[in-house]
Amino acid sequence: MAYPNELIRNFSIIAHIDHGKSTLADRMMVLTDTVAQRDMSEQLLDSMDIERERGITIKSSAVRMFYTHTDGKRYMFNLIDTPGHVDFNYEVSRALAACEGAVLVVDATQGIEAQTLANVYLAVDGGLAVVPVINKIDLPSAEPERTAQEIEDIIGIEAHDAPKISAKSGLNVDQVLAAVVSTVPPPVGDPEAPLTALVFDCFYDNYKGALTYVRVFDGTVKPGMRIRSMASGHEFEVTEVGVFTPSPMSVEELTAGEVGYIAASIKSVAETKVGDTITSAEHPAIKPLPGYKQANPMVFCGIYPADGAQYGDLRDALDKLKLNDASLSYDQETSSALGSGFRCGFLGLLHMEIIQERLEREFDLDLVTTAPSVIYRVILTSGEERQIDNPSNLPPVTEIELLEEPVVKATIMTPSEYVGSLMELCQERRGIFVDMNYIEESRVRLHYVLPLNEIIYDFFDQLKSRSRGYASFDYELKGYEKSDLVKVDFLLNGDICDALSTIVHRDRAYAKGRAVAEKLCEVIPRQQFEIPIQAAIGGKIIARETVRAVRKDVLAKCYGGDITRKKKLLEKQKEGKKRMRQVGNVSLPSDAFMSVLRIN
Amino acid sequence: MAGIYLHIPFCVRKCAYCDFVSFAEGSVPEVYVDALISEIELVSSGGEYPAAFDTVFFGGGTPSLLSGEQMQRIMTSLKAHFDIRAEAECSMEVNPGTATLEKLVAYRAAGINRLSIGLQSTHDALLNSIGRIHTFDQFLDTLKHARTAGFTNINVDLMHGLPGQTLNQYLDSLKTVCDLGLQHISAYSLILEEHTPLYSRVQSGSVALPDEDLVADMQDAGIDYLVERGYHRYEISNFSLDGFECRHNLNYWHNGEYLGFGIAAHAAVRQKRWTRYANVDTLAEYYRLLAREKRPLAETIQLTPRDEMFECIMLGLRLTRGMDRAAFRARFGLDTAEAYPVAMERLRKRGWVVENETQIALNRKGLDLQNEALGFFM
């Protein structure tokens, strides 16, 4: 039995980090008896440890609730929780596309912050109804009226009647539920029309296999049906459909307007991609839902086991993570310095950090990672074209006709007082100014074209620190542009260490070479012999530093007969040495490979 | 050879670099002395221990916070319960500013015959910077009293690598101390231990230690100077006139047996296996266990012969004369070079080792890099 569409509300929650998104979601679930108070753990929808610790959402999730309104009717709420970082912008846009409305949570002590804006605009542009909610009004420093005014001024939606709540204590949260009913429109869709269902995330469940999170726009999907991915053309048989309560629970069918999951004989998540449209194989829809694009990895780095014997474990771990994360890519590669490992591709830096952290924590692996790189395009003098995702693979200069690097169209929104320092930042990062306009008196939108390799490391941090956290940043790939790039190699004791090679703009090569050589000199511990460190472009040495030989390595004193302590110190020292990487006859600490980044 | 160590975990104030177990007190609580004595009685009535002892050592903390009477009680108890040889070396650590002439006379009467005075530097500004409670003049008073009290075997501890210390300052301290005609000098480089006030100051940048090369220069110049003044280097950080080596410490470096009393004290005895004991490191636990007539042990480690062998190497290679091959053979039934052929080969290749019929020793370069050398044996 299809649930009447006029009683369904599909929405997500948009909030700045720490403004109370997860607390509000938790509170709504308790208030609608979706979960019992006693089963509540904080951030219920964020099931990964990393999500809870960092207070961020990485994967989308969905939960179905039933709310009895003052009109006596029982409404079905589908709450879709979305990630909030620019790396996952595409996922956010798809999750929002699955909704008719969005609850905007603003902290009454902080006001609107930058990160929220990009997502609010995404929602507004997508035609979603926005339900503003002012949170944390129980705090002494709360300024609910001012916050309401700010929402009206900046976003341009009526906010003075917005529910003023404390998600923490539960105060007025019922008003949020009521506002969802009155503000968010019900879905429209024809249960009898050919099936169109939007995929907004995928998840690998250990028991049910690959689960595809969908919003059904038209038609009905039920077990036994043959379905087709409109992006890939692959067909599958539906084994189960269900909803999240928040744990997966199977239902008879999902019809137009509903949100839930489809389990099919899909081998892995890789076969269904976010943004894809699923339709019926028998009565296919004529055209897919709009907005699908292939999410390609933009940032690459080498990931190697610290202990070469763990190569197999690393491969197994990547295989497992891939099940849940279609945007992760990896290929086997070999480095003369680091042995066997993988060249991995990510959506962005946060995505990269998260994968590294999950590999280390969930799979207990000790990793060595190299500095992130983008994909460069090389046209050789022979006319051959190559994609280079690892700087050490760049052909010799003499064979290169033309080098191109990826550039992005970047949009920065900022309070006007930070414009000067943000323009300076973009300038430093080889940005090309496109235009600037005032959204309103005190807010500015800047457009720049920036090389991707200038923003993949600390651009976002810099942007935040130069704008006291108020600027927001969004980018999309523009394409490839010719650029005067060179490869800088680093030699340790005369041998090139391939894992340290980096590609930079010629104007920066000298400064970069010097800075990295100095940094390496700091992080490489003194050894039995003097170690020259050189930076080179082609065969030309552009910088040189020396790590002097160790002179004393001895425990000065015996501690009142505590021999065990001395032995433990020696064991620790030995353990530390084991974790070092042997490059030629030089021992390198694992983090030396990232140190090429941590320079200014 | 066998020794007895007693830990006196109280200080007027903790020094900024110190991570030994010690508590700030102006004197040693009577209850601690009582507990020490009950531990002595308990151990003597029970376990397996060496038949006779050649050395006694009071370490700290600040053993010179003990009153003369307290020292007398402890020494009387020790002699009543263990066979302490008549010619035994009985040492105690003394902190300038805590030992009056009366106390020193009483220590001597109680049987103490060797003092180890913690001077660290002859420069008051440096002493102050590491939180020492005394000045150089106070040290001179203590030394004068010690000699008046009849002590003729005296060590002084010095440190290099102190915050702001220059090479000349260090050499000046060495010269001043050598001119005083002492029998023994310990010259340590400062070790920056985590969880100490000095560590936090260095981390925060409010205090800077001399760089690695300067510290190495100090050590090298210090060794040369002391040798020139007639002190022979018999261990990495220890120098003495002939016949005045510290026998208690030599016993550690020979991996000999010793008992330990007091909190955080350690012991090593030969039972079925070579066994190490560590006492608990809190006063509450120490008192509680002794009140119930239980040994206040935190840890008992029985070593495999191979581990015991490594300890012999680790300790023996601290001595400039190195390992005694005959003693090693008597203990383990094989020669050192046979037990560790690969490690020995690596040492030879580095040129760090001196071998003859009776000894295997590290040369000066090998001693400088002893940790690396020991890594070969692990």
Image: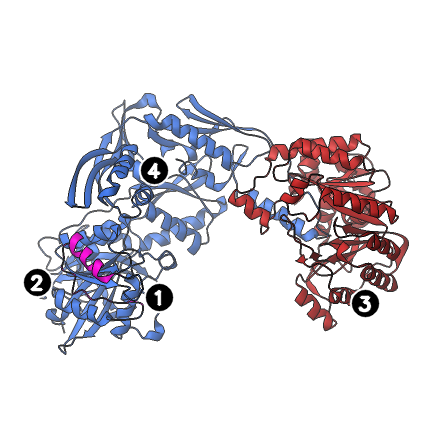
Chain colours: A blue, B red
Q: What chain does badge 4 belong to?
A: A
Q: What chain does badge 1 belong to?
A: A
Residue A154 covered by magenta stretch: yes
| Residue A24: image location, x then y, percent | 27, 65
| Disc 3, SS | helix
Residue beneath disc 1: A42
Crowd class of label 4 (few under 14; some 14 to 19; many from 20; radius 10 Å):
many
Q: Which mark is residue A373?
A: 4
- Label 2 to label 3, Cα distance in Å? 94 Å
- Label 2 to label 4, Cα distance in Å? 46 Å
Residue beneath disc 3: B41
Closer to us: A158 or A186: A158
Check if mark 2 and mark 3 are on a common chain: no
Q: Nearer the viewer, mark 3 or mark 4?
A: 3
| Disc 4, SS | loop
Residue beneath disc 2: A193
Magenta span: A143-168
